Image (spheres, grey):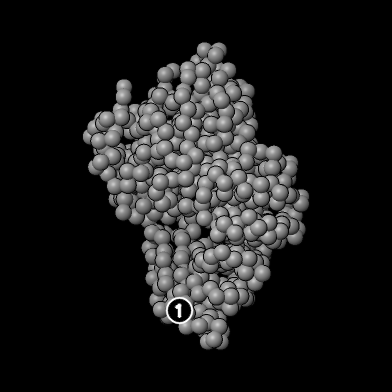
């Protein structure tokens, strides 16, 4: 069926039709043949969010570089477009060829944020793909998912045929190869899943039985099929320089969230902040060489025309050859007036030299994340940043001409007191005081803006705080109010996250597969785009929990004993449970753990081989 006429009619009735037209510069268009494997790469949010995601860009081009594979993009249609699609009885279509995604061989979602789970259900519903694995037959697409939330994908276990745990460059190719073999052998659907379940990094939920105790905790998680591992080990790329390198990017017709070139400089993190899931999931640290990065940057500049390049990592200033890299990049960016952007900088190794380099072409605002307002609480979370580090860095920035600084904090952290909350306001005030302590001739009449942003702490799997309860909603609101009341100057602006959204994020972050019924019930009630304030419908979510006879507070507000079987107990990220328990105990002793470069803490990540690991 040709959907073109109906689809084009929909475009005339929606805001931002550029989200749906495709054909951008560097997008890939292939003539699909019967022998080719078709992969629909789905991002469960709008185009401008999804097109800012580096992982999608890497895997999209990598899969399309295979002659036997066609990969097309799919984004969640905004509410106006969804209404038009449903009114016109059109299914969800891919961006490149406007093909129904139900006609693809594999439909893959990236799980970046728990509050996008309802969009996954909605996209499958729009596509006409049966929502549950058990209801899909031989002609239906296989539905898979990867990304950080896939490490505890249990709330989607009845929906996703298989999860890809870890980095996708190698494992995705192995899955495509296995699919071709399976298709040629004309075997059953279950045989394909059994075949790929033996690939390291692939988790097939239906091959594992979960038994619960009378108190609703997990009793056991065991394989129910021969030949599948008891623990599913994540997959990493051991040598980044020899892996697939992204040296071209799609250039959208419209503004997107991160509208620039992105140069990934390394993976992993040496710091071990106890709240940070990414810091544990992506161990061990592996770096690209300066030579490879400069060569990639040249190709990216030639293929995109962007005027800004961002260096991507969890902690950019921890790249061992950062100054050398910036020197080399400046040689190829300054003359072309391309700005270098360095997000994820730490206040404890920021220097005047680094600042002068990054503002060679353009000066933008600076962002730092002290995370907590007092040294005691920063020690609890193992931030390993001192107040004097922030104030020293602020002075360097102000003397260098900056007058805008963003500070990120969390509220609701374990052991937090009112003093810690007020400490955020006090610390921001000290930054303001530093600015006004600088001689007027240096300030040159500039007005200062310090933006304080707080997110609510969400205990995440595979962190030392995975056993912690979340603060109750009313407690978080009280803390937000307390902080706001203690900000005394107009130079400081305060932004905060909705605590109701953070509550649901905690529920699904630590949830089990019984929550799948809730997700499906919520989608039927109209829940979608839950990460967007204007569409978040908390009352509908509470109705869905009630209809399914599930208490969400069981997942968010309960302190968990170290001996309890966790819903993600059968997943192996390389960091041992013993290490996480040790770090949890050190947090309550207010004892910090040095970075991996200073002293190995024996987390277990060295078992993966490769990388910069000092174990």
Near-viewer residue (390 or 590) = 390
Image position of 591 with respect to 152: above or below = below
Q: Quadrant of the N terminus?
A: top left
x, y percentage for residue 330?
64, 59
- Disc 1 is placed on an element classified as loop
Residue 63 placement, left or right of 216: right
Near-viewer residue (364 or 304) = 304
x, y percentage for residue 242?
69, 39
x, y percentage for residue 554?
44, 49
**Residue shown at the point (40%, 30%) measured from the top left:** 97
**Residue shown at the point (55%, 14%) measured from the top left:** 184
**Residue shown at the point (60%, 40%) measured from the top left:** 167
The quarter of the displayed image where residue 394 is located: bottom right
Near-viewer residue (48 or 116) = 48
- The residue tagged 1 is 447
**Residue shown at the point (44%, 18%) measured from the top left:** 138
Instruction: For residue 22, say whether it is visible.
Output: yes
Local crowd size for mark 1, using a 10 Å CA cut-off: few (<14), some (14–19), many (≥20): few
Residue 236 placement, left or right of 512: right
């Amino acid at each position: 069926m040709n959907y073109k006429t109906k689809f084009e009619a929909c475009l005339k009735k929606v805001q931002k039709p550029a989200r749906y037209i495709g054909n951008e510069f560097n997008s890939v268009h292939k003539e699909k043949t019967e022998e080719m494997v078709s992969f629909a790469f789905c991002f469960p949010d709008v185009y401008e969010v999804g097109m800012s995601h580096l992982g999608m860009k890497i895997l999209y081009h990598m899969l399309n570089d295979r002659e036997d594979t066609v990969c097309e993009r799919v984004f969640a249609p905004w509410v106006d477009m969804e209404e038009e699609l449903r009114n016109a009885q059109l299914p969800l279509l891919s961006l490149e060829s406007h093909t129904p995604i139900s006609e693809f061989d594999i439909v893959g979602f990236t799980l970046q944020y728990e509050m996008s789970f309802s969009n996954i259900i909605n996209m499958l519903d729009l596509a006409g793909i049966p929502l549950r694995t058990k209801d899909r037959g031989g002609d239906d697409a296989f539905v898979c998912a990867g990304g950080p939330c896939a490490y505890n994908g249990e709330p989607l276990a009845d929906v996703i045929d298989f999860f890809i745990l870890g980095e996708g460059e190698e494992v995705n190719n192995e899955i495509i190869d296995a699919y071709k073999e399976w298709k040629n052998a004309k075997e059953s659907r279950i045989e394909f899943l059994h075949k790929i379940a033996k690939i390291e990094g692939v988790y097939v939920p239906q091959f594992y039985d979960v038994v619960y105790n009378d108190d609703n905790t997990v009793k056991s998680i065991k394989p129910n099929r021969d030949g599948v591992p008891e623990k599913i080990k994540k997959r990493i790329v051991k040598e980044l320089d020899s892996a697939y390198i992204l040296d071209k990017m799609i250039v959208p017709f419209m503004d997107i969230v991160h509208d620039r070139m992105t140069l990934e400089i390394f993976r992993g993190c040496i710091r071990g902040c106890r709240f940070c899931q990414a810091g544990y999931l992506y161990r061990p640290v592996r770096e690209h060489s300066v030579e490879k990065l400069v060569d990639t940057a040249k190709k990216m500049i030639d293929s995109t025309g962007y005027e800004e390049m961002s260096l991507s990592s969890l902690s950019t200033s921890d790249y061992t050859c950062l100054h050398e890299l910036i020197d080399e990049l400046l040689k190829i960016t300054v003359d072309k007036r391309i700005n270098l952007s360095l997000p994820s900088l730490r206040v404890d190794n920021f220097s005047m030299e680094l600042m002068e380099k990054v503002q060679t072409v353009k000066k933008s605002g600076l962002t730092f994340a002290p995370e907590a307002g007092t040294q005691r609480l920063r020690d609890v979370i193992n931030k390993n940043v001192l107040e004097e580090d922030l104030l020293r860095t602020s002075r360097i920035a102000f003397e260098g001409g900056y007058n805008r600084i963003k500070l990120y904090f969390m509220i609701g952290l374990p052991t937090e007191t009112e003093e810690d909350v007020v400490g955020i306001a006090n610390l921001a005030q000290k930054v303001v005081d530093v600015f006004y302590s600088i001689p007027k001739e240096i300030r040159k009449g500039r007005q200062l803006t310090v933006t304080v942003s707080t997110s609510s702490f969400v205990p995440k799997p595979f962190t030392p705080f995975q056993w912690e309860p979340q603060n109750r909603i009313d407690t978080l609101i009280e803390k937000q109010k307390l902080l706001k009341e203690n900000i005394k100057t107009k130079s400081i602006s305060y932004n905060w996250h909705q605590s109701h959204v953070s509550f649901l994020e905690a529920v699904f972050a630590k949830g089990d597969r019984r929550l799948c019924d809730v997700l499906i019930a919520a989608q039927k009630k109209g829940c979608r785009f839950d990460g967007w304030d204007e569409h978040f419908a908390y009352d509908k979510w509470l109705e869905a929990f009630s209809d399914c006879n599930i208490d969400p507070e069981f997942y968010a507000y309960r302190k968990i004993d170290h001996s309890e079987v966790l819903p993600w107990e059968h997943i192996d990220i390389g960091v041992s449970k013993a290490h996480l328990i040790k770090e949890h105990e050190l947090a309550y002793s207010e004892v910090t753990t040095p970075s991996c470069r200073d002293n190995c803490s024996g987390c277990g990540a060295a078992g993966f081989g490769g990388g910069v690991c000092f174990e």
